[in-house]
Image (cartoon, grey):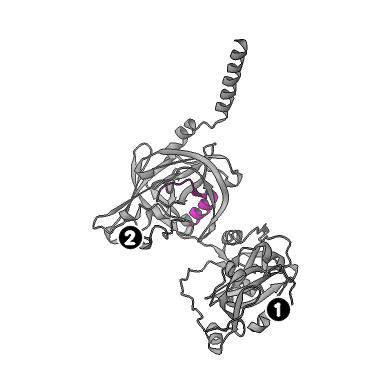
Amino acid sequence: MILRCTAALTLCFSLSIQARELPEFAGLVERQAPVVVNISATRQAASVKAPALRSDTPGRMPEWLRRWLPPPTELEESEEDDQAVGSGFVIDSAGYILTNAHVVEEASEILVRMNDRREYPARVVGTDRRTDIALLKVDASGLPQARLGDPSRLRVGDWVLAIGSPFGFDSSVTAGIVSAKGRSLPDDSIVPFIQTDVAINPGNSGGPLFNLKGEVVGINSQIYSRTGGFMGVSFAIPIDVAMDVQAQLRERGHVQRGRIGVLVQELSQDIASSFGLRTATGALVSQVEPDGPAAQAGLRSGDVILRCDGREVQNSHELPRIVGAVRPGRAVELEFWRDNRMRRVQLVVGAFPEEKHDTPPRIVEPAPRGSNPLGLVLQDLSRSQKRELALEQGASIVEANGAAARAELRPGDVVLAVTTGGQQQSLKSADHFNRLLQGLPRGSALTLLVLRGESRSYVGMKLPAR
């Protein structure tokens, strides 16, 4: 009997310790809920359109980075005004509110409702579509103001909490943990997203993500979903990124970002080895914009940028963020790897250009047969191809099998150069390529500079070991 009582006491004591270790959310919600607002945005019927993804089959629908849109069946054009619901939070007691740009995009009227049911019409101070940030202003003063935290101090596994209006249900609270930091998403190289498993649904968009101190560390912005609803993967914009954007929106109505005029790609270990690097660290320059800041400073395709403005560049996703944070006109120092040694150069950062959506030309020519150990069949460029592509040499791919197919090379691509042993050689012809391969030991790592349409990229490969 005594033993059973002792065991029971031990179990109760253990459960009591575990309960005390769990986070206490109720007090946090009571203190911070007043800074969160519900946002209703009215769009006129003329601007309500079913998006392009409407006609795709479910298996092909680009759900990745889905904004808070209703399921496709609800996106029919209507003669009635469209009402979008989102969330936001007060960052300045004078009436400044942060939310997502897609919440208020093309809105003819915006209404902000406070936690205590007060309502205010709002105007858009400015929006930035690249980061999906919008700054609103209401005519009010003395509003409760959010406390801001430091996202860099978040750890993977830390508890976080969201307050918003999923499906229009005001002041709904959900909690979870930080799943990953600095997450790069397709077509979003500017924002180092915070990934969480906090339940986020349509209507949460633009709402705050809190740490356990009650500080805003992010803005809930996107989810990964195959249904349009929460599936356990949510993304938030770090609050320091959002505050930099809103400061520029408040000051000048738009955002200025730095650029140096390069396209970069990720380094694999094979590519790094062929360039003479021990580790796959840095951003590989695949293309340099003519007359851009990088070109004027002497950078060229094949350089690996390792540091920018005193900050280490771990991968290709970090470079656009570092450069984008630099105001145009300021000089920065780049450290990069070329021909088996480190080099340094200073350049003046330019302004970010407008996006282009050109359709790249394709090369379609008949080809001879017979492949090399990489599974490639190449042929020399014709005069018309060289003239069309503004090239003096290179060889086009007409068949890609085996290792080449696994590397996602395909007919129509043009091989411009081969890098091995830290040296890059321009490719003169298809025969030149085959001779280069014959001179390499089996199992050698090499990198091809490939032109596809108007884009150049590096492809790392290995010769078969036998």
The amino acid type of the residue labelled 2 equals Ala
3D distance between C-alphas at marks 2 and 1: 53 Å
Question: Does the stretch in magenta take in 437?
Answer: no
Query: Which is nearer the eye, 336 or 339?
Result: 339
Mark 2, other Cα within 10 Å: few <14 / some 14–19 / many ≥20: some
State the residue position of label 2. 50
Q: Which of the 4 quarters of the picture holds residue 184?
A: bottom right
Q: Which residue is mark 1?
A: 436
Tell me the quadrant of the picture where the C terminus can be found: bottom right
Direction left: furthest residue: 79
As drawn, 345 above or below 114: below
437 in relation to 41, above or below: below
Q: What's drawn in magenta, residue-wise?
A: 229-248
Find residue 58 and report its horizontal and vertical position in percent.
Answer: 39, 57
Q: Is residue 140 visible?
A: no
Image height of 59 relative to 382, above or below:
above
- Regarding mark 2 in the picture, which secondary structure is present there? loop
Left or right relative to 143: residue 218: right
In this orientation, does residue 159 appear?
A: yes
Q: Quadrant of the N terminus?
A: top right
In this view, the residue in front, 36 or 439, is 439
Instruction: Specify the quadrant of the image occupied by residue 291.
Output: bottom right
| Quadrant in which residue 386 is drawn | bottom right
Q: Amino acid at mark 1?
A: Leu
Question: Horizontal and vertical percent for residue 41?
Answer: 34, 51
> Which of disc 1 and disc 2 is earlier in sequence?
2
Residue 203 lies, in percent from the top left, at 38, 46
Residue mark closest to the camera, 2 vs 1: 1
Marks 2 and 1 in Cβ contact (< 8 Å): no
